[in-house]
Image (spheres, rainbow, N blue to C red):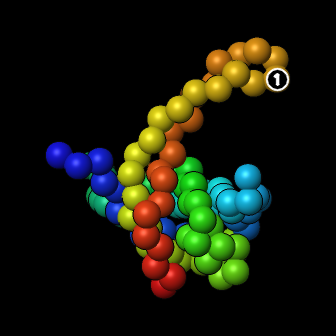
Amino acid sequence: MKNRVQLIGHVGQDPEVKSINDKKVANLTLATNEHYTNAKGEKVEQTEWHKITAWGKTAELIEKYVVKGKEIAIEGKLSHRSYDDKDGNKRYVTEILVNELLLL
């Protein structure tokens, strides 16, 4: 199977956009909501937060048009990476690297 993720959700905060080696990168969080009824008959809303990263032209579109609260659809791939923080601790990140963006 192909590594493919599709999400529709609301942006959690204004995107952080910066340039790295003359190429733009945008970082943001996306909230997706699921509604269901639990065993007691109560309606429950569950929110999941996703870390989103976009490069190049997609990052430029995000910089221009995406703000906190905006509903967007993204398609991309799941990525895992690690890095050492300023204290030397190993940190792990799971994120979605965007291939396509749809402004809703």
In the figure, 98 relative to 92: above or below?
Answer: below
Measured as percent of width and height from the top left, residue 33 is found at 44, 63
Q: Secondary structure at mark 1?
A: loop
Q: Taking 2 as reference, is 43 left or right?
A: right
Neighbour tally class for label 1: few under 14, some 14-19, many 20 plus, Cα within 10 Å: few
The amino acid at mark 1 is Lys
Q: Residue at x 53, y 32 (%)?
A: 81
The answer to which of 55 and 67 lies nearer the viewer is 55
The answer to which of 19 and 73 lies nearer the viewer is 19
Measured as percent of width and height from the top left, residue 55 is found at 58, 60
Q: Residue at x 65, y 73 (%)?
A: 60
Q: Which residue is mark 1?
A: 86
Measured as percent of width and height from the top left, residue 49 is found at 53, 52
Measured as percent of width and height from the top left, residue 53 is found at 57, 55
Q: Is residue 58 visible?
A: yes
In the figure, 97 relative to 72: above or below?
Answer: above
Q: Taking 51 as reference, is 39 left or right?
A: left
